[in-house]
Image: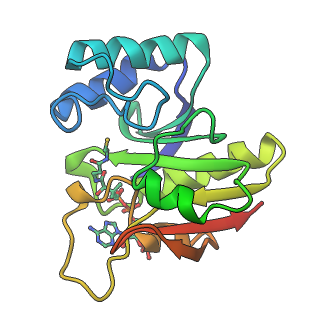
């Protein structure tokens, strides 16, 4: 499969919508809103969809789409902390925070039928390229440790597995949950 990437913009919105709808709205209708400032305050899948589209139209998000040909097969979200305040285990994170990062990578999603083929890796590579283009800095991700625990289905790895970030040079900084790490790279 030859993968390409594009940013999620009003022009590519329909491709993203097809991906989400093919996967039951992602987690039954979250529309990947969890990390945004208003999170799920819309209270319904339709509301989440509208909220996400509003962000895209207003340019208040940074998101990458991955394509196999003209089929959108993956998505990844990145941005400065103010754009993505609702990271997982936020209370534990806040206790240990010293210098905030310049950027964070939030949730990541690959079409259920296209997993294990490098889609997430292509998404993170493209997000990191965009971050470099925007001046770089300290980038954080919040992936899950998969070693030393039973095999995890991709479905539960919302923020990606640690291996995904390790391959781009991210290193562990501290834990925020039993299996979740803050990892950092400097670009
Ligand atoms: C986690 C997820 C993003 C991985 O996507 P993917 O396209 O299958 O990942 P890739 O094929 O690019 O693999 C990248 C790396 O992660 C590792 N990896 C992927 N899935 C893994 C798993 N289930 N367990 C352990 N490692 C895994 C791969 O081995 C690879 O490591 P390597 O670079 O050392 O070879 C995908 O399973 C997914 O979308 N899950 C659902 C998450 C979700 O619901 N997100 C939205 C929440 S709102």
Asked whether 50 or 7 is in front, the reply is 50
Asked whether 7 or 106 is in front, the reply is 106
Residue 6 visible to the viewer: yes
Task: State the image quarter where residue 23 is shown.
Answer: top left
Asked whether 28 or 5 is in front, the reply is 28
Farthest right residue in view = 135
Picture coordinates of residue 71 (x, y %)? 35, 33
Farthest front residue in view = 95
Q: Is residue 62 left or right of residue 37?
A: right
- Name the residue rendered at 47%, 31% in the picture: 36
Q: Is residue 103 left or right of residue 38?
A: right
Q: Is residue 119 left or right of residue 172?
A: left
Tell me the quadrant of ligand 1: bottom left
Task: State the image quarter where residue 116 is shown.
Answer: bottom left
> How many numbered tags mark residues here?
0
Instruction: Determine whether 88 is above or below 39 in the image.
Output: below
- Name the residue rendered at 37%, 68% in the picture: 177
Instruction: Determine whether 106 is above or below 37 in the image.
Output: below
- Name the residue rendered at 21%, 70% in the picture: 152
Picture coordinates of residue 165 (x, y %)? 53, 67
Instruction: Determine whether 82 is above or below 152 in the image.
Output: above
Picture coordinates of residue 161 (x, y %)? 38, 67
Residue 11 visible to the viewer: no
Task: State the image quarter where residue 84 is shown.
Answer: top right
- Quarter holding the C terminus is bottom right
Picture coordinates of residue 43 (x, y %)? 24, 19
- Name the residue rendered at 30%, 16% in the picture: 42
Q: How is the image coloured?
A: rainbow
């Amino acid at each position: 499969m030859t993968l390409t990437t594009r940013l999620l913009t009003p022009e590519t919105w329909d491709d993203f919508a097809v991906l989400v709808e093919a996967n039951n709205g992602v987690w039954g209708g979250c529309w990947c809103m969890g990390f945004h400032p208003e999170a799920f305050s819309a209270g319904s899948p339709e509301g989440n969809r509208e909220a996400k589209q509003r962000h895209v139209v207003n340019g208040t998000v940074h998101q990458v789409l991955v394509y196999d040909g003209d089929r959108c097969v993956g998505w990844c979200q990145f941005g400065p902390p103010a754009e993505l305040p609702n990271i997982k285990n936020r209370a534990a994170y806040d206790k240990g925070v010293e210098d905030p990062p310049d950027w964070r990578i939030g949730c990541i999603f690959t079409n259920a039928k296209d997993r294990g083929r490098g889609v997430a890796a292509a998404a993170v590579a493209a997000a990191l390229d965009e971050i470099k283009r925007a001046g770089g800095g300290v980038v954080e991700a919040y992936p899950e440790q998969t070693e030393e625990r039973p095999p995890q289905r991709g479905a539960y790895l919302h923020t990606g597995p640690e291996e995904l970030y390790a391959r781009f040079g991210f290193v562990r900084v501290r834990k925020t949950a039993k299996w979740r790490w803050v990892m950092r790279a400097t670009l």
